[in-house]
Image (cartoon, helix red, strand yellow):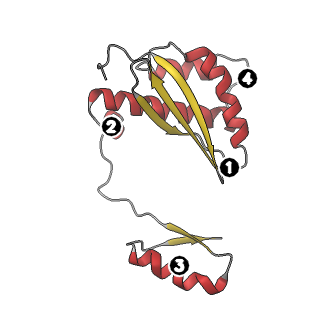
Amino acid sequence: MSGLNELKIDRIETFLVPPRWVFVRVETSDGATGWGEASLEGHGEAVVGAFEPLRDRFIGHDARRIEDIWQIAYRGGFYRGGPVLMSALAGLEQALWDLKGKALGVPAWEMLGGRVRERVRAYAWIGGDRPDEIEGAAAARKAQGFSAVKMN
């Protein structure tokens, strides 16, 4: 990447990933990429559709101008907000912060105010549709280091 001088948005792609995720990939004219998540459970296709006008508006825009992009996208229409647009904007913004962090050589969390905690407890999903498999699935996740599980 050539640094912060050439961060023009060249491509905005969305990926609908079953069962419920939407990911967005922003690529600049020099080939740098940033990723974000724009998921809205049960409405992934609508979020993907919300990216059409965002593409039309922001291809060629300076990817460093994250707040400007956000404000234009949010305030540029007669109606504002709603879960579909806000999910799309969240994914786009994440991808832009990812791009900028890579260009500066720092993680996005550093640019957004620094570290908040040293550790975050995470759970693993184990299904739960078949009660006779729950004990084994939980034991497998515990062996992987998880102390909490989520199931159906």
71 over 151 or under it: above or below: above
Q: Residue 6, position in %: x, y?
A: 36, 14
Q: Residue 57, position in %: x, y?
A: 60, 15
Q: Secondary structure at mark 2?
A: loop
Q: What residue is shown at x 67% (from left), y 24% (from top)? A: 52
| Front-lying residue, 142 or 70 | 142
How many C-alpha atoms fall within 10 Å of the one at disc 4: few (<14), some, or many (≥20)? few
Mark toward the start of the polypeptide (4 vs 3): 4
Mark toward the start of the polypeptide (3 vs 2): 2
The disc labelled 1 sits on which kind of residue? Glu
Q: Residue 63, position in %: x, y?
A: 44, 20
Q: CA distance from mark 1 to mark 3?
A: 25 Å
Q: Residue 135, position in %: x, y?
A: 54, 85
Q: CA distance from mark 2 to mark 1?
A: 29 Å
Q: CA distance from mark 3 to mark 2?
A: 38 Å
For the C terminus, the image quarter is bottom right
Q: Secondary structure at mark 4?
A: loop
Label drawn at residue 137: 3
* Quarter of the rendering containing residue 23: top right
Do the residues bearing badges 1 and 4 touch, measured as CB atoms within 8 Å? no
Q: Which residue is mark 2?
A: 113
The disc labelled 4 sits on which kind of residue? Tyr
Q: Which residue is mark 1?
A: 41
Q: Secondary structure at mark 3?
A: helix
